[in-house]
Image (cartoon, helix red, strand yellow):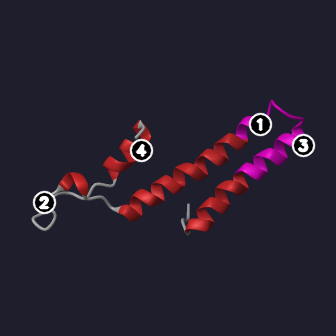
Amino acid sequence: MNKLLEEIFEECKIPKTPAWPDYERIIDLEKFAKLIIEECADICEVSGKTYAGSFTPKRAQIAENAASWCGILIRKHFGVNK
């Protein structure tokens, strides 16, 4: 796992309780999945902003819009709202 996945994993751990004594293996899978989906969608949206100097202004805007739309579609596909 890379550092980001480890951080997300740590954030999703469920605290140790008598009912769940094995703290290291229990995570909130729904939260973990949502955070992974958010990271993927954010990559699309951020990458779209890097096209400004690569194309003509009109093409850069098209690329940025497409990348943003990609992030929206990823969230929508998995039912995650920003």
Residue 21 disc label? 2
Dots 2, 4 in contact, CB < 8 A: no
Q: Is residue 68 magenta?
A: no
Mark 4 and mark 1: span between their CA atoms? 27 Å
Mark 3 burial class by Cα count in 10 Å: few <14, some 14-19, many 20+: few
Residue 37 is left or right of residue 13, and the answer is right
Residue ranking furthest to the front: 1
* Residue holding disc 3: 58
Mark 3 and mark 2: span between their CA atoms? 57 Å
* Residue holding disc 1: 51
Mark sitting earlier along the chain (3/2): 2
Which circle, 3 or 2, is nearer the viewer? 2
Mark sitting earlier along the chain (2/4): 4
Q: What residue is rendered at 59% in x and 48% in y? A: 42
Q: Secondary structure at mark 2?
A: loop
Mark sitting earlier along the chain (4/3): 4
Q: Secondary structure at mark 3?
A: helix
Mark sitting earlier along the chain (4/1): 4
Identity of the amino acid at label 1?
Tyr
Q: What residue is rendered at 69% in x and 55% in y? A: 70
Q: What residue is rendered at 86% in x and 34% in y? A: 55
Identity of the amino acid at label 2?
Pro
Mark 4 and mark 3: span between their CA atoms? 36 Å
Dots 4, 1 in contact, CB < 8 A: no
